[in-house]
Amino acid sequence: GTIRLGSTRPRLRMVAVALTLVLLAFVVRLLQVQGVDASTYAAKAEKNRYVGYTLAAERGGITDRNGVALAASVDAYDITADPTLFTREQLKVDDGPEQAAALLAPILGQEQEAIAGKLRPENRSLRYTLLARRQTPQVWKQIKDLKSALAAKSEADRTTPNVLAGVLSVASSKRVYPNGELAAGILGWVNADGKGGGGIEQQLNKELSGKNGEIRYAQSGGRQVPTAHARETPAVPGSDVELTIDRDIQWAAQNAITEQVAKSRADRGYVIVQDTRTGQILAMANSPGFDPNDLSEASSANMGNAALQDAYEPGSTAKVMSMAAVLEEGVATPGTHVVVPNRLHRGDRLFKDDIDHETWYLTLNGVLAKSSNIGTILATGQLGKTQPKANKVLYDYLRRFGLGSYTGLGFPGETPGILAAPDKWSTSQQYTIPFGQGLSLNAMQAASIYSTIANGGVRVQPSVVRGTKGPDGRFTPAAEPRKTRVISARTAKTLARMLESVVDDREGTGTKARIPGYRVAGKTGTANRVDPATGKYRGYTSSFAGFAPADKPRVTVYCAIQNATQGNYFGGQICGPIYKQVMEFALKTLQVPPTGAKPANLPVTYKP
């Protein structure tokens, strides 16, 4: 018999139906991907294809009053990497991160293991890691040249992977200080995160920092795809800051105090130069200091601004405030007779001057010129009918001069000093505070006292910032400083004449501060010093404060040295010459001529 084949039509129908169902599934899936879920898949693709980086804003510069750069930012690069480009799937080798780390470690100056760990993170989807911050253009060029050489070798031999293909860079900037240690206590420094870590850099960090931007772009094989769309939000540069400091005067002050601290083998010292009329700081020098370009060599104890952060007992330079109170209250005049014995019993103590002497017959002017502790106690005792009332009057004047309050500079770590309320003064403090022991201040406060007298009795709040210049080039001056009347102009003028006797009269203690051709007003100070480590008295604080020209003041200079251990420690002997050196330089720099007037020559002694 014959074998009859089955009909092919049912089979064709089945195949057709199956193909139709398959095609329908593809169509449905295509509609889902391209129509319904298109945005979701596009976002996923963009996430894997696009990378984003922060565009660091250029930090504003810091200049002195004449536009000379004190802190600036130069081009640098953050060295980064995309860890997904170091996997076996990409490089076809198991030890890609280790090979890359071996090449990068000597260039970046880092441990090979640390770099390899960043290139092989626990999070395998991580697309960004920072290898090194703020590297010089030379470092990045060295890495680029090495990448190019490996890329060429990889193209010639497909079995050789380019293990540096995933190493990238982001343009950044690096902070530099062209003058090294000069004014470091004022400027501060910038830390590893690009933020101010002290001084002006910290105080005005927001203004200096600007606003970071952002960029996102497509990349392939560690390189940007030039034809793909990129989104960029530009960074806004920081503002430039102009200080009141004069670089040349700052140099003279820092050089003088550094030499004397080394010569005296002292713990530290400070010099402040201030414009008496405006309150602007022309120099604020500390020794020892630090180089903000290389903090690895800096001592943490020297990285602040000791002229504002150290609180110490001023000694006899504070007597000028006691004399101001006596003159302003009208209880004595420069010619008032004061009998000064060798010893004076008050409260539970016997007080003496710095040298033993027979009974002195001094004028009030002579008490200041010879820096007599006993004479100052006797004079301030006349401020009230009782000692507590006299204490209250003196306290009010000390507060007016700025003691116990912040200077207004707003510096990080600044101390207001210590001035107890008069009802808290101990028996001895009632008599030591008039000659500068039993209270404390910082060097800026001490300088401000003399600037107040030089400015006719008006205290001008000290300032160190003249203004800022924004990215648009517009200069915004700093706010006007606060002005406060402390004593009358008449009293201030009388005090200036009395302070001349300290320097000009042969009986005075500040003869080493004389400047030929100029009338100089000044005061010496030698105080027992509280050791910050033990809280007990050890050593001395030596100081000198004054202004010139005495009859038409322009500049105040204050110097203090802590714990001089070699040679003389009297303020007039070791700080007087510094005052002279710095003041002479400042007067010449500012082109201040001598007035040509003759000194007052007030009497120092009298015959009983």
Image: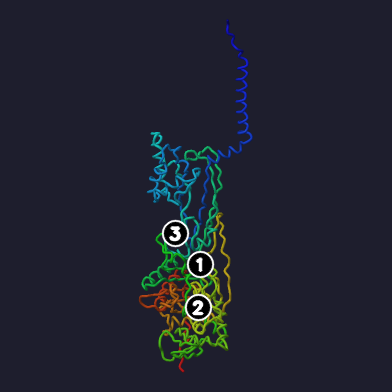
Specify whether 46 is left or right of 120: right
Query: Which of the numbered marks, if any, corresponds to residue 439?
Result: 2
Question: Where does the image place residue 593, in percent across and percent down from the top left?
Answer: 47, 73
Dots 2 and 1: beta carbons under 8 Å?
no
The residue tagged with tag 3: helix, strand or loop?
Answer: loop
In front: label 3 or label 1: 1
Q: Determine crowd level at label 1: few under 14, some 14-19, many 20+ residues with C-alpha closer than 10 A.
A: some
In front: label 3 or label 2: 2
The residue tagged with tag 1: helix, strand or loop?
Answer: loop
Residue at far right of view: 36
Specify whether 335 is left or right of 15: left
Q: Which residue is mark 1?
A: 413
Q: Which residue is mark 3?
A: 177
Task: Name which of mark 3 and mark 2 comes first in the sequence.
Answer: 3
Question: Where does the image place residue 39, in percent across and percent down from the top left?
Answer: 61, 38
The residue tagged with tag 2: helix, strand or loop?
Answer: loop
Q: Amino acid at mark 3?
A: Tyr
Task: Name which of mark 3 and mark 1 comes first in the sequence.
Answer: 3
Q: Amino acid at mark 1?
A: Gly
Cα–Cα gap, marks 3 and 2: 37 Å
Dots 3 and 2: beta carbons under 8 Å?
no
Question: Where does the image place residue 304, in percent across and percent down from the top left?
Answer: 46, 66
Task: Name which of mark 2 and mark 1 comes first in the sequence.
Answer: 1
Q: Nearer the viewer, residue 467 or 431?
A: 431
Q: Nearer the viewer, residue 211 or 546?
A: 211
Q: Is residue 524 above or below residue 164?
A: below
Q: Nearer the viewer, residue 371 or 18?
A: 18
Cα–Cα gap, marks 3 and 1: 22 Å
Q: Amino acid at mark 2?
A: Leu
Q: Total marks drawn?
A: 3
Based on the displayed image, in which of its 4 quarters is residue 505 positioned? bottom left
Specify whether 325 is left or right of 539: right
